[in-house]
Image (cartoon, grey):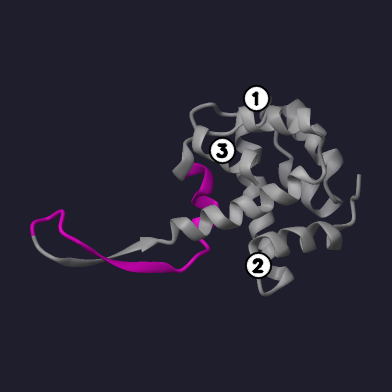
């Protein structure tokens, strides 16, 4: 187990093809905060033991169990709130309107890169246990990271 923060962030940075370590740090913290909401206390504790100290603290919570009702949008919401939006054309109101929407594909890419870093710190069995606690779409991202 490598608990070196720089090595961990380098893996995330490479997986996402980020320009800076700062981007990897921000993505990692946002993803871990979301994971804190869905993992049980035992899973959070075990995962924190695998992560570098500065990131293990992102999993701290007073909640005993994760929330099984968290969906994809809620999970990646922390990530998306930090990203720029994209302008798209919308016809739902009958006309052609320009609307601004979050960059969901970018949030998914960043989350999956963090998952790749996390999977490098845990064994296969625990990785599958983590995937089982994640919202369905997010679990697929974790498994494919």
Crowd class of label 1 (few under 14; some 14 to 19; many from 20; radius 10 Å): some
Q: Crowdedness of circle 3 by 10 Å Cα count: few (<14), some, many (20+)? A: some
The answer to whether residue 72 of the structure is visible from this angle is yes
Q: Which residues are magenta?
A: 74-94
**Is residue 21 left or right of 6 when viewed as pictured?**
left
Of marks 3 and 2, which one's residue comes earlier in the chain?
A: 2
Q: Residue furthest front?
A: 144
Residue on which disc 1 sits: 65
Residue at the spot of label 3: 140
Left or right of 6? Residue 66 is: left
Seen at 69% across and 30% down, the residue is: 128
Please report whichever mark, 2 or 1, sits nearer to the chain's N-terminal start: 2
Tell whether 117 sits left or right of 145: right
The residue to which callout 2 is attached is 17
Rendered position, 131 above or below 19: above
Q: What x and y, as percent, mark residue 94? A: 8, 57
């Amino acid at each position: 187990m490598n608990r070196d923060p720089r090595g961990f962030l380098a893996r995330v940075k490479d997986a996402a093809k980020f320009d800076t370590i700062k981007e990897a740090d921000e993505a990692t913290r946002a993803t871990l905060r979301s994971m804190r909401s869905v993992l049980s206390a035992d899973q959070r504790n075990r995962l924190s033991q695998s992560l570098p100290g500065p990131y293990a603290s992102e999993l701290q919570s007073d909640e005993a169990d994760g929330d099984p009702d968290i969906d994809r949008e809620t999970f990646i919401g922390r990530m998306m709130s930090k990203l720029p939006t994209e302008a798209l054309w919308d016809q739902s109101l009958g006309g052609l309107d320009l609307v601004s929407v979050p960059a969901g594909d970018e949030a998914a890419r960043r989350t999956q890169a963090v998952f790749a870093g996390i999977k490098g710190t845990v064994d296969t069995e625990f990785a599958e246990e983590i995937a089982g606690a994640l919202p369905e779409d997010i679990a697929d991202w974790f498994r494919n990271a």
